[in-house]
Image (cartoon, helix red, strand yellow):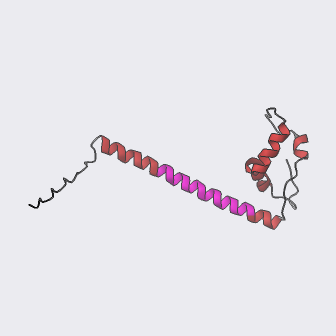
Amino acid sequence: MTFDPEKALPELICWQLNHAAWANAWFRRAMQGGIMDAIQSSTLKTLQLPLPGLDEQALIFDRYQKITDRTRKDSDQLDKLRKQKLGLMQDLLIGKVPVQVDEPVPKAVNG
């Protein structure tokens, strides 16, 4: 697919086609109950994309990229912490790291 660079930011259109709920719904309707291995050009020609001005498209796509980058970093950090947790649990289970259990102090009996 090619787009007029004076009207559309191709990356934003790609993002919409791959992730927007309205686009997924539109493609499901266009399939008419069948399984579509590829999107046919005749199907794409009837698609009407919401297309704000280029400046707004750039702002939207910039925000999308920042959120995606942050989500990716957070996901990487979560994976790292999960692996660290598993390693610590393993060290505790095999006794590599001793666990000190404090004995409860008996309460004095008044009497």
Q: Nearer the viewer, residue 107 or 104?
A: 107
Where is residue 74, by image quadrant? bottom right
When the figure is inspected, residue 87 is found, relative to residue 6, above or below; the finding is above
- Using the rendered view, name the quadrant where residue 64 is placed: bottom right
Is 77 included in the stretch rendered in magenta?
A: yes
Image coords of residue 58 (percent x, y): 77, 64
Q: Is residue 55 left or right of residue 86?
A: right
The one of 61 and 34 positioned closer to us in this rendering: 34
The residue shown at (64%, 59%) is 67
Q: Is residue 91 left or right of residue 83?
A: left
| Residue at figure coordinates x 77%, y 52% from the top left | 16
Q: Give the residues in magenta.
A: 60-80
The residue furthest top is 34
Q: Position of residue 71 (x, y in %)?
A: 60, 56
User: What residue is drawn where x is 88% and y is 56%?
Assistant: 4
Quadrant containing the C terminus is: bottom left
Q: Position of residue 70 (x, y in %)?
A: 60, 59
Any magenta on residue 71? Answer: yes
Magenta stretch, overall SS? helix
Residue drawn where x is 36% and y is 45% of the image: 89
The image quarter containing residue 106 is: bottom left
Residue closest to the far left: 111
